[in-house]
Image (cartoon, helix red, strand yellow):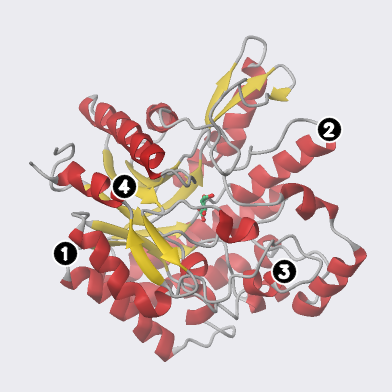
């Protein structure tokens, strides 16, 4: 049954490193190979989306969806500083054109966690040179593909590094932190570190403490991320003024019990409010929500007794999305696009129930007049959940990694039906 109008962008999302395979020039790839690192397994061929993107986009289209959010891999496009790869440019041109030719709106992300090794060697996401480097890459993308793009997310989950710092602090303070970061990070391993890992990092990046995107960030690093976003926005607008530009944030539905008000306010300020000035010029905000977090007088509380947990160990809480949409709309006045929302589960019926409840929430927000322009489920495919590897199954499409054969799950069609009249 139709739940959204034809102009509404209804689709699914992926990120290059998690699906393409063999992203060998990126920092994530380098870290996955480290014997003492925190990655549970390497990404390898991933789900070979690099070669099978047509099949995947066709499945999305046939289910009735009209948008595909994916990322362009900076390390492929600019394998060495200032050197752009024609071959990889043509690859992404084909992906974008394929979407266009099939009536699918491409929503492109320029940076989704992984970065080129050369960037990390220069100091990565703590270096003053990074905003300019990112702006140069953004300008190249706008010049190459601008005519075919209407929506660009500069940086995925710009607040991830700050969230990791917060959770790290909480672990140090012996607080309950399992399942409190909305991404597949093995927090305890990440923090434990080891002299061997320091050596492996030194070899790969010329520093034993590489400032990769998914690592604890300083306040200076947070400013670098904001500057990089603003600089990329400027590049994009200069080369292709029609493109709607935004970034995405990882946003928990932050709730509190009596006594937790102050801490909850601080958490929300760190996660969202302090970014408002840099976002003021954006056309849209990409909202990414997976669950809620309940704050008590001493910080985050454990999941409620008896709560259903997802494979990621956070609470099944699809109603969190509408709470977050309403909350951000009070302060951010551009459009809102849900760029990620989803559940890791082996039970597709729970996925259908999750997306049904979450999209009902989106519909209520639209009816109340909120400018929510799209919803992309995470993820189109079962894929590589970063440090947690292939065990987490978020996908609308399952993949047998031995054969790379795809099997659409009923949830793919359940989502597509939300744009159909019958
Ligand atoms: C990220 C994705 C990730 C998903 C599920 C988001 O934090 O953008 O890359 O796979 O959450 O954890």
| Circle 1 residues within 10 Å: few <14, some 14–19, many ≥20 | few
Q: Is residue 116 above or below residue 228?
A: below
Q: Is residue 422 left or right of residue 175?
A: left
Q: State the image quarter where residue 323 is shown.
A: top left
Q: Does the residue labelled 1 lie within 8 Å of ligand 1?
A: no
Q: How far apart are the two marked residues, 1 and 4, measured between alpha carbons?
A: 21 Å
Q: Earlier in the sequence, mark 4 or mark 3?
A: 3
Tag 4 residue: 411
Pointer 1 residue: 103
Q: In which quarter of the image is the C terminus?
A: top left
CB atoms of marks 1 and 4 within 8 Å? no
Is the residue marked by circle 2 packed among few (<14), some (14-19), or many (20+) residues within 10 Å?
A: few
Q: What element carries label 3?
A: loop
Give me the C-alpha separation between circle 3 and circle 1: 41 Å
Nearest to the eye among marks 1 and 4: give it. 4
Q: Does the residue labelled 4 lie within 8 Å of ligand 1?
A: no
According to the image, label 3 marks what residue? 123
Task: Say which label, 2 or 4, has the lower sequence index.
Answer: 2
Image side of residue 68 versus residue 200, left or right: left
């Amino acid at each position: 049954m139709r739940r959204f109008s034809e102009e509404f962008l209804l689709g699914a999302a992926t990120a290059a490193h998690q699906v393409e395979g063999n992203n060998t020039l990126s920092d994530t790839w380098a870290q996955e190979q480290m014997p003492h690192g925190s990655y549970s397994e390497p990404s390898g061929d991933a789900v070979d989306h690099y070669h099978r993107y047509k099949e995947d986009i066709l499945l999305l289209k046939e289910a009735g969806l009209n948008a595909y959010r994916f990322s362009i891999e900076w390390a492929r496009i600019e394998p060495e500083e200032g050197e752009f790869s024609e071959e990889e440019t043509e690859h992404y041109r084909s992906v974008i054109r394929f979407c266009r030719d099939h009536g699918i709106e491409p929503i492109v992300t320029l940076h989704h966690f992984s970065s080129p090794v050369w960037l990390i060697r220069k100091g990565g996401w703590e270096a003053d040179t990074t905003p300019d480097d990112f702006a140069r890459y953004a300008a190249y993308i706008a010049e190459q593909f601008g005519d075919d793009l209407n929506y660009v997310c500069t940086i995925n989950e710009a607040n991830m590094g700050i969230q990791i710092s917060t959770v790290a602090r909480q672990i140090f303070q012996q607080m309950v932190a399992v399942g409190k970061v909305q991404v597949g990070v093995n927090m305890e391993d990440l923090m434990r570190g080891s002299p061997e890992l320091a050596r492996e990092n030194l070899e790969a990046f010329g520093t034993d403490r590489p400032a990769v995107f998914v690592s604890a960030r300083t306040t200076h690093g947070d400013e670098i991320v904001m500057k990089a976003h603003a600089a990329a926005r400027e590049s994009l607008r200069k080369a292709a003024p029609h493109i709607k530009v935004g970034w995405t944030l990882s946003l928990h539905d932050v709730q509190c019990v009596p006594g937790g008000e102050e801490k909850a306010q601080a958490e929300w300020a760190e996660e969202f409010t302090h970014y408002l000035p840099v976002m003021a010029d954006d056309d849209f905000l990409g909202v990414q929500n997976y669950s809620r977090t309940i704050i008590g007088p001493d910080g985050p509380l454990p999941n409620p007794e008896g709560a259903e947990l997802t494979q990621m160990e956070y609470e099944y809480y699809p109603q969190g999305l509408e709470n977050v949409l309403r909350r951000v709309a009070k302060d951010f006045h551009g459009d809102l696009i849900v760029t990620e929302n989803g559940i890791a589960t082996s039970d597709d019926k729970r996925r259908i129930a999750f997306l049904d409840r979450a999209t009902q929430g989106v519909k209520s927000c639209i009816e109340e007049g909120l400018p929510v322009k799209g919803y992309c489920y995470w993820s189109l495919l079962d894929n590589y959940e970063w440090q947690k590897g292939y065990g987490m199954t978020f996908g609308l499409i399952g993949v047998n990694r031995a054969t790379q054969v795809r099997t659409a799950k009923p949830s793919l069609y359940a989502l597509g039906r939300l744009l159909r009249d019958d």
